[in-house]
């Protein structure tokens, strides 16, 4: 059976004429007005529902159904210049919704995910994304704006998250190198409080899913699925592997292995360990006993005196030692092989939130150079010319001193060069640095 035939069976609304909104709303209201739709409601052969049903406001959703042509306009025909990345689902492109494309929808940047028909995921994962994110609303779940379902084409439209995912922020750079007035910013590691903030918000997202009347099992919690906006607010994404959890007295859930290597349950403990250590879950470049993060770090989490061996050295001691002890103890609990010893996500949130208020972080501001405003190429050329003149004058002065027998500067003494007027030296805390850089950004970063 071909893909299109299968989709016709599961998603007839993508291929057949649709009912009028009034008829659709009336029919769905009779069956599902008081509960959240589940994946089985659409995939059950006896169900009369189709994917278009969940895009109606009868269950509180406001999903927009886009045409393929609209999404081509939004992404400039999926231009390579708008390419953001690719996962198991398929490529993702940045786009922008203008008022003239979709009247009534706020003008905004978006991320458009296109299902790769030859990829590792398929229409069921696409459908799961629409079912769950189309109905679940929470500050720490990424917002699904709409979808496209035309013939074999399957696309998803999300809010745009300016700082990408946590994995990139942890292992590539906190601020991806870019140029501002020909000056490249240097990457710095994620600060301690930012890491704890991300952990808290991701935990809140999971706690919300687990606390639903019809619980949701996420099944693919990892650093690459935690997206960050311009303020480093964390939101869970990629619900393709999610499933409805047990309700009432039912306790059985599937034991099928899901997700990514190194993130075997309990996966929250693994991500918390990444935030503490700054190490990848699987790093084949390290010595054999350190290749697998959990195997290497878990024994060290129990001993507070060994924390220095696992805390990300790039933090350079700028972290709360008391907070690190509590976070390490929590990670150890979360990584327990026995589920009854693991804390619930609501308890994880309660443990992490107070760490944001720990005041024992050493004061250690760093110095960096920023370019003042108003620079231009002409000014740069003139300053370069002046610098050359000053350098030549310095050489002449040295020759005069030597001729006059004046004492020379002791060997090994490094002369501190005065900064030119085009730069200013400033000391910033982490928060002030974010504020400064955010104000300088001309456009959101990928």
Image (cartoon, grey):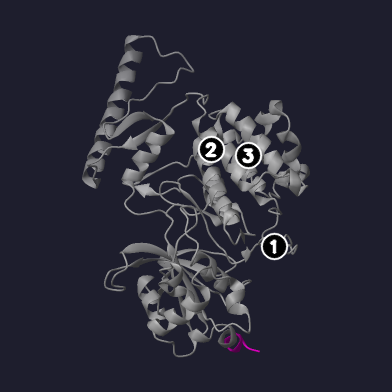
Q: Nearer the viewer, mark 2 or mark 1?
A: 2
Q: Is residue 362 above or below residue 264?
A: above
Horizontal side, residue 88 vs residue 335: left or right = left
Range of magenta residues:
1-6
Quadrant of the frame with the C terminus: bottom left
Along the horizontal axis of the image, is 284 left or right of 316?
A: right
Residue 184 in picture, x, y percent from top left? 40, 44
Identify the residue position indicated by label 1 in the image: 258
Q: Is residue 178 visible?
A: yes
| Res 351 → quadrant | top right
Residue carrying label 3: 277
- Mark 1 and mark 3 lie on one chain; the one further toward the N terminus is 1
Report helix, strand or loop for mark 2: helix
Mark positioned earlier in the residue sequence (2 or 3):
3
Label 2 Cα neighbours within 10 Å, binned few <14 / some 14-19 / many ≥20: some
Q: Residue at x 40, y 76 (%)?
A: 66
- Percent position (x, y) of residue 187? 47, 42
Relative to 27, say whether 409 is above or below: above
Per the model, the C-alpha gap separating discs 2 and 1 is 29 Å
Q: How many numbered tags mark residues here?
A: 3
Label disc, if present, on residue 353 of the rendered structure: 2
> Looking at the magenta stretch, what is its main secondary structure?
helix
Q: Quarter holding the N terminus?
A: bottom right
Asked if the stretch drawn in magenta spans residue 38, the answer is: no
Q: Residue 258 appears in which quarter of the rendering?
A: bottom right
């Amino acid at each position: 059976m071909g893909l299109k035939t299968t989709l016709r069976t599961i998603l007839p609304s993508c291929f057949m004429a649709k009912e009028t909104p009034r008829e659709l709303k009336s029919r769905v209201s009779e069956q599902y007005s008081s509960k959240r739709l589940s994946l089985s409601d659409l995939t059950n052969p006896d169900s009369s529902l189709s994917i278009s049903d969940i895009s109606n406001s009868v269950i509180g959703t406001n999903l927009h159904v886009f045409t393929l042509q609209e999404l081509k306009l939004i992404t400039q025909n999926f231009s390579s210049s708008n390419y953001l990345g690719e996962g198991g689902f398929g490529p993702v492109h940045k786009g922008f919704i203008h008022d003239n494309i979709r009247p009534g929808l706020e003008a905004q940047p978006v991320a458009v995910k296109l299902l790769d028909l030859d990829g590792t995921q398929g229409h069921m994962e696409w459908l799961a994304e629409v079912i769950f994110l189309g109905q679940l609303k929470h500050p720490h779940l990424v917002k699904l704006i709409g979808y496209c379902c035309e013939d074999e084409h399957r696309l998803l439209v999300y809010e745009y998250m300016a700082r990408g995912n946590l994995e990139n922020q942890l292992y590539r750079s906190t601020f991806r190198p870019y140029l501002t007035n020909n000056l490249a910013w240097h990457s710095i590691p994620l600060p301690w409080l930012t890491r704890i903030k991300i952990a808290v918000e991701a935990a809140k997202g999971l706690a919300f899913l687990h606390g639903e009347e019809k619980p949701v099992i996420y099944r693919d919690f990892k650093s690459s699925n935690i997206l960050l906006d311009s303020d480093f607010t964390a939101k869970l994404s990629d619900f393709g592997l999610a499933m409805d959890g047990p309700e009432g007295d039912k306790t059985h859930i599937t034991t099928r292995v899901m997700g990514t290597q190194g993130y075997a349950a309990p996966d929250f403990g693994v991500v918390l360990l990444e935030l503490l250590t700054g190490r990848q879950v699987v790093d084949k470049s390290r010595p054999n006993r350190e290749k697998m993060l959990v195997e290497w770090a878990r024994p060290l989490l129990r001993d507070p005196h060994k924390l220095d061996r696992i805390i990300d050295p790039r933090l350079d001691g700028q972290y709360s030692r008391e907070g690190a002890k509590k976070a390490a103890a929590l990670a150890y609990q979360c990584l327990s092989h026995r589920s009854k010893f693991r804390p619930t996500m609501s308890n994880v949130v309660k443990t992490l939130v107070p760490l944001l208020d720990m005041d024992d972080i050493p004061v250690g501001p760093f110095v960096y150079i920023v370019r003042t405003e108003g620079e231009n190429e002409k000014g740069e050329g003139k300053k370069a010319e002046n610098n050359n003149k000053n350098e030549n004058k310095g050489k002449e002065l040295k020759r005069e001193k030597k001729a006059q027998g004046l004492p020379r500067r002791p060997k090994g003494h490094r002369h501190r060069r005065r900064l030119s007027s085009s730069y200013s030296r400033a000391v910033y805390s982490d928060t002030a640095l974010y504020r400064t850089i955010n104000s300088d950004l001309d456009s959101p970063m990928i």
